[in-house]
Image (cartoon, rainbow, N blue to C red):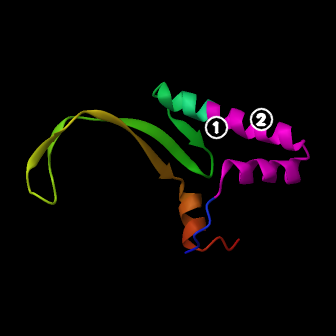
Amino acid sequence: MGEKTLTRMDLSEAVFREVGLSRNESAQLVESVLEHISNALVRGEQVKISSFGTFSVRDKSARIGRNPKTGEEVPIQPRRVLTFRPSHLMKDRVASGNKG
């Protein structure tokens, strides 16, 4: 597995090269898309990107956890967690090593 990380700058550079917007416009476009996704998730909405996957927010209830070092029981507060479920196409593409 590679250790490379895709960043916002990489995304805006790809938009710049492939779409033909200026570098500044490309960066603004990427920021706008990410902002729309983030805002929808904060509102509790699902974000479904066809052939990629679905982001959603799930409420987890309070529970008792255990400190793995000491074995002591610790209360875990209720919280909202972000989940991602890849589409079947994305799962297949990743499994095949992006051949195709």
What SS does tag 2 mark? helix
Query: Of 85 and 40, which appears nearest the observer?
Result: 40
Is 72 on the left or on the right of 84, as rendered? Answer: left
Residue under numbered circle 1: 34
Inspect the image, locate mark 2, and give the three-letter code of the amino acid beneath it: Gln
Q: Residue at x 57, y 67 (%)?
A: 94
Q: Residue at the location (8% across, 51% down)?
A: 72
Q: Amino acid at mark 1?
A: Leu
Q: Is residue 7 left or right of residue 14?
A: left
Report if residue 74 lies within the magenta region: no
- Above or below, 16 relative to 92: above
Q: Callout 2: 10 Å neighbours few (<14), some, many (20+)? A: few
Quadrant housing the N terminus: bottom right
Work out which quarter of the rendered image holds the C terminus and state it. Answer: bottom right
Circle 1 or circle 2, nearest the eye: 2
Q: Which residue is mark 2?
A: 28
Horizontal side, residue 61 vs residue 2: left or right: left
| Residue 81 location (% of width, % of height) | 38, 39
Q: Which residues are magenta?
A: 6-35
The location of residue 96, given as percent across then percent down, is 59, 74
Q: Does 23 lie within the magenta span? A: yes
Local packing at callout 1 (Cα closer than 10 Å; few below 14, some 14-19, many 20+) is few
**Among the 4 quarters of the image, the one containing residue 69:** bottom left
- Between 5 and 59, the one lying in front of the other is 5
Label 1 element class: helix
Mark 1 or mark 2: name the one nearer the start of the chain.
2
